[in-house]
Amino acid sequence: MSLGRREFLGWGAAATAGAALAPVINLVELAQARSPVEAASALRRWGLLIDITKCADCDDCVTACHNENGVSGNGRPETDAQWIRKVGLRDKRTGVAQTLPMMCQHCEEPPCVDVCPTGASFKRDDGIVLVDKHTCIGCRYCVLACPYGARSFIHETVTGQKPDVPRGKGTVESCTLCVHRVDRGDAPACVEACNRDGGKAMLFGDLNDPSAEIHRRLHSEPSTQVRADLALNTGVRYQGL
Amino acid sequence: MKRIVALALSLLLTAAGFVHAADKPAGRVPVPAFKIDSGETCVAPTQEMRRDHMKMLFHQRDRTVRQGIREPRFSLKNCVECHASRDTGSVLGTEGFCSSCHAYTAVKIDCFECHSSMRQAKSAGARK
């Protein structure tokens, strides 16, 4: 029972690879899993990086979002809720057209939170901006304050809600960054759909985690915030704008 | 002596009243008609649940929404999962676990104007 030279080298390589991968796997686990009894940590800041040069001419992100969150319209586009939408841009001189998904930008300094009279609009410790519908009185100040037009007021009685996404008449809502999915360690539905069926333009991750892909790219490649002049420090960044 | 007899009599009447309210299903006192399909043992003793379930839900809802603590023990989703009717899959309806008692006590319940009153298990099983 002796190891041949090739076998020895093979096992050695496997062991080295295992040792090298183990910490990476640990890091991934650390970044993903949070116990359900643990509060969201201020050490994290969840965000998105959207490369609009890859953004295909589809609306898979919109469909996925609205399926995941049970957002269905009543055929009245002026009052129907909209958590994410595709925006078209066209350069008038050159005619170059681009599209990009636009949703709540999960600002560090959210104007919607500033104007909310009841404290229903709030930013969670990990940077996700949400509406606490238990305290929302439906005044719609936040709808006016949001520079991105990300918030919708629910005008009509809602039925058939998803168990993870309560929605009801008389409250304001917007993209939650799929907080129920993020809390169990998954990426938001739009990101998953974009990477599966779309142009693989969206990347989700922790902006504060140096080992995260999104952190690396934001620190090595140019990116822009929409309405950077407002200095809101958005959690959603775009590339190729 | 008179006083003792009176006391004994009042005690007896009170006890009889309690027994009547708690145990006798039919009779002059109406009782809520709900079926408990599952959930013989809840997250706390029955008496405590009857008295304090709303406090548990209130406490939990703020922790969940504001801090992202999704402890399954006191979550509304978990209540529905366990207590939804086998027939309708819902905690509402005339024999619904939540609605029948709330109708009986005339306490308006507005959880389910936003939250789903339906058991998720089937759809969750299908998705995985």
Image (cartoon, grey):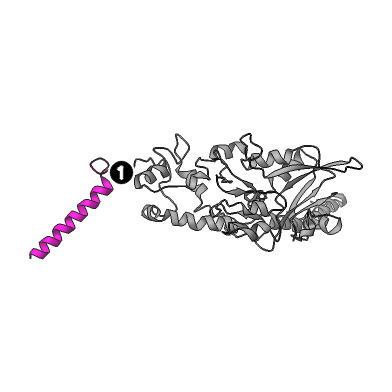
For residue B102, say whether it is visible.
yes
Above/below status of B83 relative to A46: above
Quick one: quadrant of the C terminus of chain B?
A: top right
Question: Is disc 1 surrounded by few (<14), some (14 to 19) or many (20+) residues within 10 Å?
Answer: some
Give me the residue at 71% from left, 40% from top.
A62
Residue lying furthest left = B1
Q: Is residue A235 magenta?
A: no
Q: Which residues are magenta?
A: B2-30
How many labels, in total? 1
Q: Residue at x 52, y 43 (%)?
A: B116
Q: Secondary structure at mark 1?
A: loop
Q: Position of residue B57 (x, y in %)?
A: 48, 54
Residue carrying label 1 = B31
The quadrant holding residue A74 is top right
Residue B33 percent across, percent down from the top left: 34, 40
- Taking A232 as reference, is B8 left or right? left
Instruction: Work out whether residue B69 can be spotted.
Output: no
The chain carrying label 1 is B
Quadrant in which residue A21 is drawn: bottom right
Amino acid type for the residue under numbered disc 1: Val
- Where the N terminus of chain B falls, by quadrant? bottom left
Q: Residue at x 63, y 53 (%)?
A: A183
Where residue A43 sits: x, y (%)? 69, 63
In the rendered image, residue B113, in percent from the top left (x then y), is placed at 50, 44
Majority secondary structure in the magenta region: helix
Q: Nearer the viewer, residue A233 or B116?
A: A233
| Residue B3 lies in the magenta-colored region | yes
